[in-house]
Amino acid sequence: MSSIRYYKRDSLPLEMHKVRIVQKLNLPTLEERLANVSEAGNNTFLLNNRDVFLDMLTDSGVNAMSDRQEAAMCTADDSYAGSETFVRHEKKLKEIFGMPYVLPFHQGRACENLLAQILVRPGTVVPMNYHFTTTKAHIMVQGGALEEIIMDKGLEVTSSDPFKGDMDPDKLKDVIKRWGVDNVAFVRMEAGTNLIGGQPISMANLKEISGICKDKGLTLVMDISLLADNLHFIKTREDAYKDKSIREITKEMVNLCDIVYYSARKLGCARGGGMCLKDSATYEKFKELIPLYEGFLTYGGMSVREIEAITVGLEETMDENMINQGPQFIEYMVNELDKRGIPVVTPAGGLGCHIDAMRFVDHIPQTEYPAGALASALYIISGIRGMERGTMSEQREEDGTETLANIELLRLALPRRVFTLSQIEYAIDRINWLYDNRHLVGGLKFTEEPRILRFFFGKLKPVSDWQERLAAKFKEDFGDSL
């Protein structure tokens, strides 16, 4: 893929697959979009998919599966216990990741649930490069605390640093000193920091953090849900690994950790999850809870058909031409928006294109959820569903004080092998128009606010009639065009 050059144009992402099954899309009218977003309480999670044109909410469970994955699903062994499907799955996991113990889970947050139950107790802390929403919630439910010790560069929205997800080793040493070794539940690294723009970690940093953990006798846990993108970035951005295979890089990363877990809804392009462990005693603690929470040890709450698909999907993840398309499409979208002066997270990361709402709508205070308002505005003028990753994704303190996010992002996820370049160009065009009319976008306020994970099903309303005014301007500029 990297050797393909064009004759009379700059580089362009080139799909290394062909489309053989298609799904019809629907682009509702402007009036319908305005009504839809109001009915959904200005929460893009609550929009019906039939009312969405391009679904850029997430890359979780919406990636395109390959023909080989679809075929593998027909060979599944439905046995409740001792399924041959799991035997094949377990063998593939051990082959790719090199860890001796494997446990199936129905998805990544189920892994987080047991990690928190088994390793976290009240008064303990989990240092991490950056939190993910469900990870944080599971730790807090168990009475634990967390400290985000990402390198300062990680929160610089505009940057040229290739590895903004790296953990600060000095901050980790400080956390260990302040809390005491016995009060550090585990150290967590996220390979591809979701909430700050899918920014990767470097192998060099992972080695350093692993060394500190080994020296102090601490368990190092890595969330590898976004591993595919991170592997691509290590291969292309870290000089020491440009001649290494994806398989070699994977083994080296995992070998630096004690436990890795993943959502196969992202890694493997199917619907499930799993965990790999080095230590037999730790494995036994998790093993006895799998039948209680997930299902038997040979299916872990997953359909065996999905397990077959994951097995093939993980093998396909070792193919550089499979894992590079997502990052290359994202980079194209980021660069095109950046050229137009539209504020985006740079450098381009994995998962999706991330718009910096603090600069895009800098007139909206964080207490009125600028990233959420931007998501609502983009849907109204395009039918594109994005996802708020900012203050709305936090939760209030016990006294009701709003927890303001470090950064306010509108995430436009690009599920793997799903969108065409013309659809990306449509998104760029509509975002460009919205940026030129950004003064029309106003804030939001909650009308229904759950206490935990409010961004999933909370409802909000606009603080003024800004949505009607935005729609009127769109109508003025585009007429009857959708």
Image: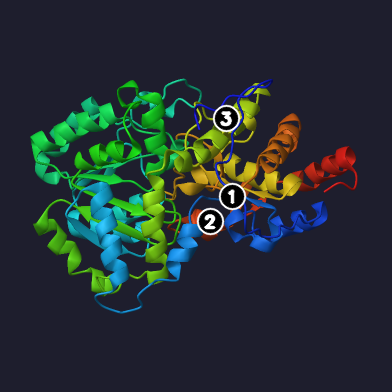
Query: Where residue 162 appears, x then y in whole percent?
Result: 41, 24
Q: Residue at x 34, y 51 (%)?
A: 135
Query: Where residue 287 appears, x then y in whole percent?
Result: 18, 66
Frontmost residue, 171 versus 447: 171
**Callout 2 crowding tier (Cα within 10 Å): few <14, some 14–19, many ≥20:** many
Q: Earlier in the sequence, mark 1 or mark 3?
A: 3
Mark 2 is on which residue type? Answer: Val
User: Could you tell whether 221 is left or right of 78 in the image?
Assistant: left
Q: Earlier in the sequence, mark 2 or mark 1?
A: 2
Mark 1 is on which residue type? Answer: Val
Frontmost residue, 397 versus 190: 190
The residue at which mark 2 appears reads as 62
The residue at which mark 1 appears reads as 418
User: Could you tell whether 444 is left or right of 471 in the image?
Assistant: left
Element under disc 3: loop
The image's colour scheme reads rainbow
Query: Where residue 312 appears, x then y in whole percent?
Result: 39, 57
Tell me the tag on residue 344: 3
Residue 364 to residue 71: above or below: above
Q: Earlier in the sequence, mark 2 or mark 3?
A: 2
Question: In whole angstroms, how far apart are the C-alphas of marks 2 and 3?
Answer: 24 Å
Q: From the viewer's perspective, is the residue at label 1 or at label 3 nearer?
A: 1
Question: In whole angstroms, how far apart are the C-alphas of marks 1 and 3?
Answer: 22 Å
User: Is residue 212 visible from the viewing direction of this image?
Assistant: yes
Q: Residue at x 34, y 52 (%)?
A: 262
